[in-house]
């Protein structure tokens, strides 16, 4: 697995969990957990395995979509890395 992709996933997952802890509306938080359980099979939301499996099922042409540059995506979850590259965390 791509180490940068895993780091990007971990940063986003930790932020999601922290945001949920700060939610004052426990009913809304519980609804999010139920939605995530139904959609991703885990009440804490999507996990890296789910994302990797989704990437693996993509048609090859979809994997070659570009981000900001003209370079093709490479490795699992490259688009995920692109989502947080500008945060300065990677």
Image (cartoon, rainbow, N blue to C red):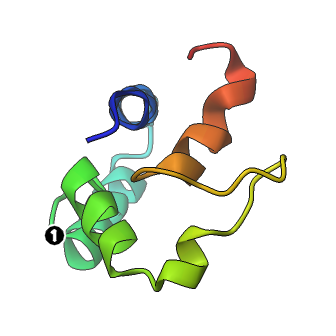
Q: Quadrant of the N terminus?
A: top left
Which residue is rendered at x = 58% and y = 14% of the image? 89
Please, is residue 63 above or below residue 10 in the view?
A: below
Q: Nearer the viewer, residue 81 or 44?
A: 81
Q: Is residue 42 visible?
A: yes
The answer to which quarter of the image holds residue 27 is bottom left
Residue 54 position in % (x across, y down) = 34, 72
The answer to which quarter of the image holds residue 81 is top right
Which residue is rendered at x = 68% and y = 68% of the image? 65
Q: Quadrant of the C terminus?
A: top right
Residue 79 position in % (x across, y down) = 58, 52
As drawn, is 53 to the left or to the right of 78? Answer: left
Instruction: Estimate how packed mark 1 is, as few (under 14), some (14 to 19) or many (20 or more) residues with alpha carbons within 10 Å.
Output: some
For label 1, the residue is 41
Q: Nearer the viewer, residue 27 or 72?
A: 72
Please, is residue 65 above or below residue 12 in the view?
A: below
Total marks in image = 1
Residue 37 position in % (x across, y down) = 20, 68
As drawn, is 55 to the left or to the right of 74? Answer: left
Please, is residue 71 above or below residue 60 in the view?
A: above
Residue 84 position in % (x across, y down) = 63, 33
Q: Is residue 44 visible?
A: no
Label 1 SS: loop
Q: Nearer the viewer, residue 67 or 13?
A: 67
Which residue is rendered at x = 75% and y = 53% of the image? 67
The answer to which quarter of the image holds residue 6 is top left
As drawn, is 57 to the left or to the right of 71? Answer: left
């Amino acid at each position: 697995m791509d180490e940068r992709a895993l780091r990007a996933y971990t940063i986003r997952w930790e932020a999601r969990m922290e945001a949920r802890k700060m939610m004052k509306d426990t009913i809304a938080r519980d609804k999010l957990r139920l939605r995530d359980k139904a959609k991703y099979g885990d009440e804490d939301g999507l996990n890296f395995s789910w994302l990797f499996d989704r990437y693996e099922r993509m048609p090859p042409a979809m994997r070659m979509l570009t981000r900001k540059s003209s370079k093709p995506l490479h490795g699992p979850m490259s688009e995920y890395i692109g989502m947080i590259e500008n945060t300065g965390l990677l």
